[in-house]
Amino acid sequence: MSRIAVLAMGGTIASIPADTGGVVPGLDGAALVAAVPELAGHDITARTVRSLPSPSVGLPDVAALAAEVRAEVAAGVAGVVVTHGTDTLEETAFYLDATVGAPVPVVVTGAMRHPTSAGADGPANLLAAVTVAASEQARGLGVLVVLSDEVHAARFVRKQHTTSTAAFASPGVGPLGVVVEGVPHLRAVAPVSPDLPVAEAGQPRVGLVAVGLGDDGELLRAAAPVLDGVVLAGVGGGHVPEVMVPVVAEVAARVPVVLTSRTGGGTVLRSTYGYPGAELDLLARGVVHGGFLDPAKARILLHLLLAAGADRPAVDAAFALYR
């Protein structure tokens, strides 16, 4: 039997009814494993790292999780499964992908329906995640996300629906594979990881500013003095209104500003549009090309880079891995 470590972080998959109404995280890792009899075929250890709804998971919590994953890998497990709330699951998975560099599979999973709801998907997702974590095929693919019997790479996956059990997708590339009749079928994809150190709590502060029609840049101007870096979620291929350009240039002269797209799929353009506020203009003003990383993941990467002391060329080189 393969020895698999299950690390629980809370979320819908672990939620139970609360006296005050609704559901809240309350089940520990052992309870999650015990609810899936089919897992008896694996040698599983289960621990609870946090018991939080995922909107309340912070960067220090994810740093602690990364340390736990590394400790399990050092102890000789064949794979690690992390259970997590789905609201910020993609960010935690990407953080692990950028920092852990494990030689064994690391798989993140969760649930869209809590355990007491009809058709709860948590047990099936946990079973599929453990199955993938125990698979030799899953080695060397970076951190994976498994839900609804689909296997996704952490750097591509996004939550794209508020309630559907098929909420997770990888825009433009699709899943790396599927689990059919308990067997993972995966296609090999070279992992991409800058192998960054886990950031210490509290530093640095990276802002994410979404751009919209008629935006004048005053929100960015107001936030910039307290930020060490900025991710711009531009419109379309990575564009901002012309009126924003002076503000963006001013901030980019002081701290790294990474250009991404709010669309959810595709890469930031590099050389198509030349009007003020388009990609040619912004890149010429020192803005960093964010590649195909979505804004939330770009924020995680920039945080880790700045925490590691990366200068502008190092920031650009790291984001170049995702272009």
Image (cartoon, helix red, strand yellow):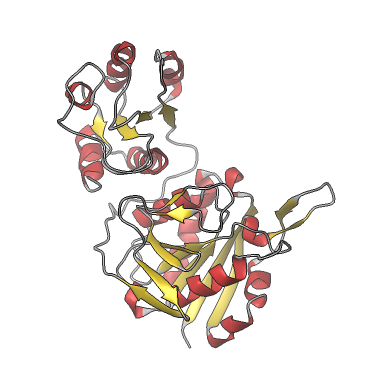
- The answer to whether residue 319 is above or below residue 74 is above
- The answer to whether residue 270 is above or below residue 225 is below
Q: Residue at x 66, y 66 (%)?
A: 119
Q: Which residue is at the front of the view, 176 or 223?
A: 176
Q: Which residue is at the front of the view, 9 or 309?
A: 9
In the picture, which quadrant includes the C terminus? top left
Quadrant for residue 310, please give it: top left
Q: Residue at x 80, y 52 (%)?
A: 18
Percent across and percent down for residue 318 are 24, 44
Q: Residue at x 47, y 70 (%)?
A: 80
Q: Which residue is at the front of the view, 69 or 231?
A: 231
Tell me if 256 is positioned left or right of 221 in this view: left
Residue 76 seen by the camera: no
Residue 209 seen by the camera: yes
Q: Residue at x 60, y 57 (%)?
A: 112
Quadrant for residue 293, please give it: top left
Percent across and percent down for residue 157 are 40, 53
